[in-house]
């Protein structure tokens, strides 16, 4: 897919307090490799022109571990996912398409990212996204659809009504954007203020913005829900390692 002016932005600035460790979350080992290494493998399979890792907490350690094979952007303030992506603008160097994913989702397959990318390229709107269905939310926002079954908004779990919390279609936070549209709309995101903090800019708000402008947001279902597992606790890491070991055994069989 080289030559398509694609930039992949991997968000890896989180502190990861629930890991109960001094090690940056994305560097925790999974089958002998830092978990972010698997994310980088999946991203590189798309042959992007630019591969950007957004670092923050203990970013020097992440840079040292990953080396010069990627570009870096720094999020100095923890102001949410929208703010984090905006820090990568210069590093994407005018690429026409930007694919965003997380450094703590090591089970996401390259084939799934490729399907998302092709879905984006086949349509006319400014963005496409992955969705996942299941009985466990894992803290993901809920997908709200209109009467025609099209994605109309994403509601973060903390802001869901009791009825919205019953929705079993979730947002794992992986998107493909038209770069010009993305960079022009990120600075306009509203600030969501939490109790006692500086607030956050939610990348998810871009979905309802696109819909309000009359665009159709294309969604790609993740067929294997385990791909959407994000690592936030040591227990999640154990769960992910068991899945990865099983995958490796299936390949060898």
Image (spheres, rainbow, N blue to C red):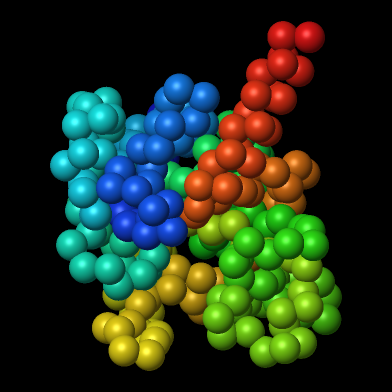
Q: Residue furthest right?
A: 148
Q: Residue furthest front?
A: 20
> Which residue corresponds to the image point at 54% horizontal and 58% vertical from the top-left?
173
- Which is nearer the eye, 36 or 2? 36
Q: Quadrant of residue 199?
A: bottom left
- Which is nearer the eye, 242 or 127? 242
> Which residue corresponds to the image point at 65% horizontal and 24% vertical from the top-left?
245
The reply to whether residue 2 is in sight is no
How many marks can you see? Answer: 0
Is 78 placed left or right of 237 in the picture? left
Where does the image place residue 252, in percent across and percent down from the top left?
Answer: 72, 9
Where does the image place residue 74, in percent across and percent down from the top left?
Answer: 20, 53
Q: Is residue 230 above or below residue 144?
A: above
The reply to whether residue 23 is in sight is yes
Where does the image place residue 118, in percent across and percent down from the top left?
Answer: 62, 41
- Which is nearer the eye, 40 or 120? 40
> Which residue corresponds to the image point at 77% horizontal and 58% vertical from the top-left?
133
Q: Quadrant of residue 47?
A: top left
Q: Is residue 4 above or below residue 189?
A: above
Where does the image place residue 168, in percent across and percent down from the top left?
Answer: 78, 68
Q: Residue furthest top?
A: 252
Is 142 placed left or right of 167 in the picture? left
Q: Could you tell me which quadrant the C terminus lies in?
A: top right
> Which residue corresponds to the image point at 31% horizontal and 61% vertical from the top-left?
84
């Amino acid at each position: 897919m080289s030559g398509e002016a694609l930039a992949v932005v991997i968000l890896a600035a989180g502190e990861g307090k629930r890991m109960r460790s001094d090690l940056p979350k994305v560097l925790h080992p999974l089958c002998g490799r830092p978990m972010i290494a698997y994310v980088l493998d999946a991203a590189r399979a798309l042959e992007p022109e630019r591969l950007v890792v957004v670092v923050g907490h203990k970013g020097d350690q992440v840079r040292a571990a990953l080396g010069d094979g990627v570009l870096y952007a720094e999020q100095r303030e923890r102001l949410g996912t929208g703010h984090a992506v905006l820090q990568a603008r210069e590093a994407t160097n005018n690429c026409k398409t930007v694919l965003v994913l997380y450094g703590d989702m090591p089970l996401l397959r390259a084939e799934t990212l490729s399907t998302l990318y092709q879905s984006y390229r086949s349509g006319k709107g400014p963005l496409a996204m992955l969705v996942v269905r299941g009985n466990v939310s894992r803290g993901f926002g809920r997908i709200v659809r209109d009467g025609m079954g099209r994605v109309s908004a994403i509601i973060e779990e903390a802001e869901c009504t009791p009825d919205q919390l019953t929705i079993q279609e979730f947002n794992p936070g992986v998107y493909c954007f038209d770069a010009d549209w993305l960079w022009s709309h990120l600075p306009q995101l509203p600030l969501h203020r939490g109790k006692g903090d500086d607030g956050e800019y939610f990348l998810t708000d871009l979905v309802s913005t696109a819909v309000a402008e009359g665009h159709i947001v294309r969604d790609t279902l993740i067929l294997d829900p385990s791909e959407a597992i994000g690592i936030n606790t040591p227990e999640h890491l154990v769960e992910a390692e068991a899945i990865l070991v099983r995958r490796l055994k299936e390949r060898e069989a």
